[in-house]
Image (cartoon, grey):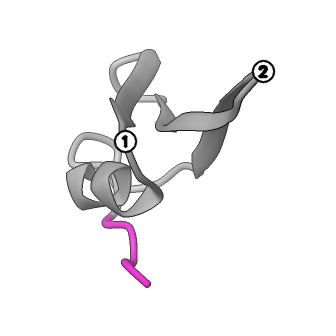
């Protein structure tokens, strides 16, 4: 299992990885983080949970 690094900007906050579903099942995963420092969302989408976690 890949462990997520802290946000490079705010060094904190919560990060979520969630599956993107369609009628055929899960087709991708998204990593979401709200950064207090930049006051915005950081989002990565990939084909697998491991792929998006490698961004974080």
Q: For numbered disc 1, what is the local secondary structure?
A: loop
Q: Which sits in the foreground, 24 or 41?
A: 24
Q: Quadrant of residue 19?
A: top right
- List x then y, in percent, for residue 9: 24, 40
Q: Which sits in the foreground, 33 or 11?
A: 33
Question: Which callout, 1 or 2, points at the residue further toward the start of the chain?
Answer: 2
| Residue at x 71% of width, y 28% of height | 24
- Residue furthest to the front in view is 24
Q: For numbered disc 2, what is the local secondary structure?
A: loop
> How far is mark 1 from mark 2, CA to CA?
16 Å
**Circle 2 Cα neighbour tier, 10 Å, few/some/many (<14 / 14–19 / ≥20):** few
* For residue 30, side relative to residue 5 (left or right): right
**Circle 1 Cα neighbour tier, 10 Å, few/some/many (<14 / 14–19 / ≥20):** some
- List x then y, in percent, for residue 54: 24, 60
* For residue 51, side relative to residue 1 (left or right): left
- List x then y, in percent, for residue 15: 54, 49
| Residue at x 40% of width, y 26% of height | 43
- Residue furthest to the bottom in view is 1
* For residue 19, side relative to residue 9 (left or right): right
Q: Quadrant of residue 12?
A: bottom left
Where is 47 relative to 36, above or below? below
- List x then y, in percent, for residue 1: 44, 84
Q: Which sits in the foreground, 43 or 21?
A: 21
Residue 28 is marked as none
Write the start and end of the magenta stretch as one range: 1-5
Secondary structure character of the magenta stretch overall = loop
Disc 1 marks which residue? 47
Disc 2 marks which residue? 23
Q: Which sits in the foreground, 17 or 9?
A: 17
């Amino acid at each position: 299992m890949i462990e997520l690094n802290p946000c490079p900007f705010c060094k904190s906050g919560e990060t979520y990885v969630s599956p993107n579903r369609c009628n055929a099942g899960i087709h991708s995963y998204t990593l979401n983080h709200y950064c207090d420092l930049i006051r915005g969302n950081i989002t990565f989408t990939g084909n697998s949970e491991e792929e998006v976690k490698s961004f974080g």
